[in-house]
Every structure is written in structure tokens, then in C-alpha cells.
Image (tube, grey):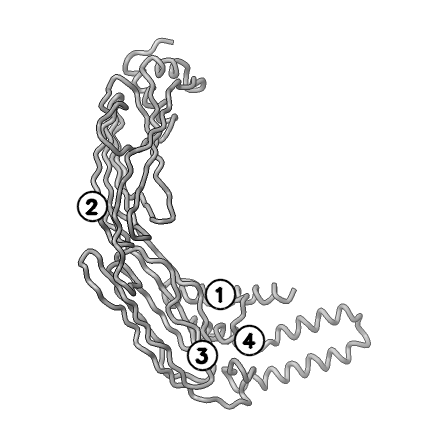
Amino acid sequence: MVMNTKERRGMVGWILSLVMLFTLRYGVAGEEGVAVSMEVSNPTPYQGEGVVVEINLSQVDHDKVMLFTLHPPQNQHYALYQVAFQKRERYHDIKHYYRYLIYPKVDGPLSLSFMLTQSITDDDKVAYAISGDRDNVKGLIKEDVEIALKPIELQVKALPQGTDLVGNYQLYYRLDKNRTKAYEPVNLEVEIQGEGEMEAFEFIPLSENYHRFSSPPKVERSHSTQGTQSRIHWSYAFSAKENFELPEVTLQAFDPKQKRHYTLHFPAQRINVDPVDQATLVDSKEYPQSSSTLWDEAWWGWLFSYGMAFLAGYMTPRGFWRRWLVRSARLEDPLEQEVRKAKTHRDLLKILLRANRKEDHRAVEALESVIYQANTLPLDQIKGMIKHASENRDT
């Protein structure tokens, strides 16, 4: 099969795309026939401050066919993200542009060493590789050279003593109420967001003065050529039998761009708790009954169920009646009645937080997403999740 020049160049581009990925090099023009330029936004950053590294790669030996694969360094002392990549794939004239975002985690000297795999071949070997058709591609004969690139050297400065966060952030919070009934929860939403690299941490500590219900904080980070935008969101519920106080939280923050020290402040919150009649509690140690009439309804239902179970025990096989009794008792569970009667997502969330059952964690997350994140999920569907979790627990 004879190919003209245009067809051959088209096949060259196709075969090269199958061979390997294209990446970068750091250094200056050298024996490898590659010119590299690099810019570092700040060689002396603070610990936790973002550093931008830009690298340009150009092929200068146009007689050869070159391919490149870069292996970015990985180390526990920093976080590295590639946030941009552009390329020009001209035959015999390849150009690449890379942009990295680096966050040092320790102070002191820091060295980042990239490894480059350079693949070199020529026109004759490429012509041989494409001499077959698309269903019979021959292997490209090439020489792979491993190159240790000149390290990127940073001198990382220590943070001011007592710094909790590095970056430019704002703190928001919302407490749904400052007065509640004994054992009935109050809900607190806390969020920190802004520019910088944040890791998850706990915001409100545990205490003997209240019960704290929470899920792991939700962390979102978005890396771009402009830096990193971070967001941490906490959802808490607190309950107690008497007045209590949520502690003040003060975070010391440092903005390295503006060399600015500032604080994020959550003021102490006094929660007044109204006592309840102990006779109305399902569990006098933990949670109150939401309706005083619920106990009466449940008591008559249980009395009837167990009375019928006792009388029918002489007429029905024991194993069959045991299964019926468990199912009947479950159907009359006061918690299930509360769930069934709940009219809003918020009412249902309060019921589940009081019950504090592990099997309801998915339903709690679904309710929080509806209430606090404006997601759409029918109330009946969430009740179905709770029913399914209860059935799996009893089987």
C-alpha cells in the first residue's frame, strides 16, 4: 500500500495519540533537545500558603520525533494539584504548558523533583509503524530515556504561633432556637468558607452538660488557576434535661497574601431548657414523648395485642405466633407512630434525632439535605427509608 505525504502525516498523528501521554520538563535547553522555562509565584511561602508553578516545554531538536511523560513528585510534606494544561501537537514541534498549585505542609527547605520519561524516534520508524492498516498497527520503535529534572526549591516559613487556619475565610452559623424542652434538640449549622486549603476538624466539642449528635463535617474543595476555594459545613443537634451553654469557639487565622492576622468567632450560646413532667417521658433518662396522648393509644394497643397472643397461644403453633407477635409489636411501636404522623421534614428530623438510632443515619442525612441544602425529596419517600431500616433491624 502506497501513501501520499498527506495521508502519512495523518497516520502519524493517529499512531502518536495511541502511544503515550504528553507532559513536561523543568530546566533549560540541553542535550535532550528540549527547552524548558519555569516560573514560581513565591519561592518563600508560609506553611499552608499556595504556590503557583508554571512550566513551558518546547521541542528544539526538530529532526527527531519526541514524546514526553511527566511524573509529578508525591510527598506527605506538601499537597500538589495540576490545575491547567495546554498543548500544541505539531509533528516535530511539540509545545506544552503546565500550571501546578502546591501547598507546603511543613516549614523549612522543601525540594520537589519531577521525573521525565522522554521517548525519541525518527520518521523511518514512524513510517514503519504505520505501514499496516488500522487493524494491523505495528509497534513504534523508540528509545525511552528517564531524566531527573532539576528540583524546585522552596524555603517555607513557619506560621505565627497559635495559627489554626491559613487563608482568607468567613464563618457563618445558624441556631434554630435558644429555648427548648427537656431532651428536645436544638439544631446548629456552622460553615466556614473562603480561599485556602482546609482540612476537616471538629468545631463544637463534646461535653457532659449536653448530648451532641452530629455527622462528619462535609468538606468541599475546588482547585483552579486562581487558587483553592474551600468550604466546611457542620450539622449539630444538642439536647439536655436542664439549661446548658454551647461554648465559645475562637479560631486564629492568618492570611499570607495580606500578611493579616484575624479571628473567626462563634459566641457562646445559652440554651434555656423547660422541664417536662417525668410521667410523659418514654425514657426518663434520654428523650421526651412528643404527645401525651401517644402513650395511651400505644398502651391499649399493646394490651390488646399481648392479650390476644396469650389466648391464642393454646391454639396456634408457638413459632408462628412468635413471628406474629413480633410483627404486631413492631407495628404498634410509638416511634413508628410518630414518624407516620410527622407533617414536615423538620418535624421528622427532630423525631429521629431524639430516637438516635444508628439505622436511621441515611434518613437523617436525607432530611438535612432537604432542610439545609434545599434539595428535593418527598417526605413519604424518607418515611419509607425509615420503615425499611426498622424492618431490616428486626429480621
How far apart are labels 2 and 3 at the CA level? 48 Å
Answer left or right for 172 relative to 387: left
> Where on the picture, by quarter, is residue 169?
bottom left
Sooner in the amino-acid sequence: mark 1 or mark 3: 3
> On residue 210, which mark appears?
3
How far apart are labels 2 and 4 at the CA level? 59 Å
Q: Is residue 125 above or below residue 80?
A: above
Helix, strand or loop under label 2: loop
Disc 3: CA contacts within 10 A as few (<14), some (14-19) or many (>=20): some
Where's the C terminus, which quadrant?
bottom right
- Label 2 with label 4: CB-CB less than 8 Å: no
- Label 1 with label 3: CB-CB less than 8 Å: no
Disc 4: CA contacts within 10 A as few (<14), some (14-19) or many (>=20): some
Residue depicted at 46% across the width and 79% down the height: 208
Q: Amino acid at mark 4?
A: Leu
Residue depicted at 26% across the width and 45% down the height: 154
